[in-house]
Image: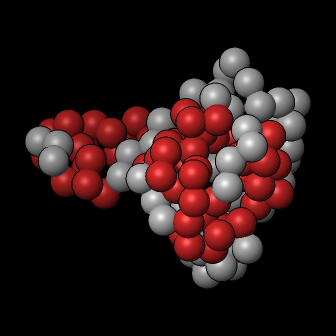
Amino acid sequence: MRKKVRLQDDKTNQPALQTDRLKMLRRKMNLTQKELGEKIGLSNKTISNYEKRDRQPDNETLLKLANFFDVSVSYLLGETDNPKLLDDTIVLLTDKDLKHMQEETREMVYSIIDTIKRKHGS
């Protein structure tokens, strides 16, 4: 069951990574911060900053972490307690993704997002 409240990072007002979950998943795989960083292309300092909540990962990194640990992004963000939520179909697009789209495609993506927001009251 999804939680109603989405925790947010104070600085960006974006959903916040649940640092206890990141640390628990890393330890469950017997990985140091350095080893995890090496496996997903980040420094151990960056992993440490995530775990101390000094920094928040961008969307691409959230997706890398979710894929690496085989959990949903929703689980990492604390939106669900089920790490394998089957109906978790979050699509993460970065500014880089949008920049490389043709204008018509980009407008279609924005239109779809607006429609979903209106339908679900977001």
- Residue 118 falls in which quadrant of the image? top right
Image quadrant in which you'd find residue 84: top right
Q: Residue furthest top?
A: 86
Residue 116 visible from this viewpoint: no
Quarter of the picture containing the N terminus is top right
In this view, which residue lies farthest toward the left? 102
Q: Nearer the viewer, residue 6 or 106?
A: 6
Residue occupying the point 86% across, 43% down: 3
Left or right? Give the position of 36 relative to 2: left
Image vertical order of residue 61 relative to residue 74, above or below: below
Answer with left or right where residue 24 lies relative to residue 66.
Answer: right
Visible residue check, residue 107? yes
**Residue at the location (49% across, 45% down)?**
39
- Horizontally, is 108 left or right of 56 in the view? left
Residue 119 in the image: state x and y as whole percent: 60, 36
Q: Residue at x 40, y 36 (%)?
A: 112
The image quarter containing residue 30 is top right
Above/below status of 38 relative to 111: below
Q: Name the image colouring.
A: secondary structure
Q: 109 or 71: which is nearer to us?
A: 71
Q: Position of residue 86 (x, y in %)?
A: 69, 18
Q: Nearer the viewer, residue 95 or 110?
A: 95
Q: How many marks?
A: 0
**84 is higher (above) or lower (below) than 73:** above
Q: Residue at x 56, y 73 (%)?
A: 45
The percent coordinates of residue 65 (x first, y second) are: 57, 44
